[in-house]
Image (cartoon, rainbow, N blue to C red):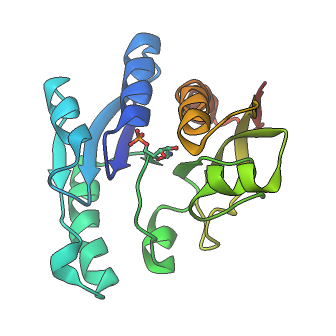
Amino acid sequence: MTRVAILISGGGSNMLALVGDMRQGGYAEPVLVAANDPLAGGLAKAAALGIPTAAVDHRPFGRDREGFEAALAAHIDAAKPDILCLAGFMRILTPGFIARYQGRMLNIHPSLLPKYPGLHTHARALAAGDSHAGCTVHEVTADLDAGPILGQARVPILPGDTEATLATRVLEEEHRLYPAVLRRFVQGDRTPVYLD
Ligand code: GRF
């Protein structure tokens, strides 16, 4: 059974969507949920679902990114995952960490990449007057938010939309897109999934 580790920083709604789909579809099993913040809400949710968890607080490491990542990788490697899913994980990873998992590490980003890599994606789409927004699942490479695209979902931007209303609409699509991409990726199929 394909073993999947999920990295989170916050509430973990994408993690819950992935875990629910894996267990419903039986195509993979979640073997670890790890966070860079011991207080991440998603950790308690994962534990309640019987999934092993780990937390490595990045703050004591200061600028020592490698030190933080080595501590995190120890927990990841102990779980022996086949695939790593970044799901609301808010730390930038060094090329050294990425090299360890490249080719089997996915991320979901709340924009229609290549538009709006980085932060504040919804505010930027609204400010640009875009007609649509959305989310992208991509393979993680050393180029931030720029790896091969594995799936995208689009939502309309509606009159009166705020950053919050748009974020909510996109997040719903993230929860549909990420499991659909993971199912395909587990089969070794890297054909992009497009949800409209
Ligand atoms: C959300 O902003 C989502 O768009 C992005 O990460 C943030 C938190 O996601 N992918 P989650 O609820 O922790 O999965």
| Quadrant of the snapshot with the C terminus | top right
Which residue corresponds to the image point at 46% horizontal and 78% vertical from the top-left?
94
Where does residue 3 sit, x and y in percent of width and height? 37, 37
Query: How far across and how far down the image is residue 44, in percent?
Result: 15, 35
Q: Residue furthest bottom?
A: 63
Looking at the image, residue 76 sits to the left or right of residue 140; the answer is: left
Q: What is the count of numbered marks?
A: 0
Please provide percent x and percent y for residue 102: 55, 62
Indicate the quadrant where residue 188 lies: top right
Q: Is residue 111 left or right of residue 95?
A: right
Q: Quadrant of residue 127?
A: bottom right
Q: Is residue 140 visible?
A: yes
Q: Percent from the top left, x then y, of residue 79? A: 24, 47
Relative to 122, residue 156 above or below: above
Residue occupying image coordinates x 21% and y 70%: 71
Image vertical order of residue 97 relative to residue 111, above or below: below
Whether residue 190 is visible here, answered yes or no, is no
In the image shown, does 145 or 30 lie closer to the viewer? 145
Image: 24 above or below 140: above
Of residues 129 and 138, the one drawn nearer to the viewer in this rendering: 129
Q: Quadrant of the N terminus?
A: top left
* Residue 95, placed above or below residue 180: below
Determine the residue located farthest toward the top in the rendered image.
24
Q: Residue at x 70, y 35 (%)?
A: 189
Q: Horizontal placement of 59 versus 153: left or right?
A: left
Which quarter of the frame holds ligand 1?
Answer: top left
* Apparent side of residue 28 relative to residue 64 in the rendered image (left or right): right
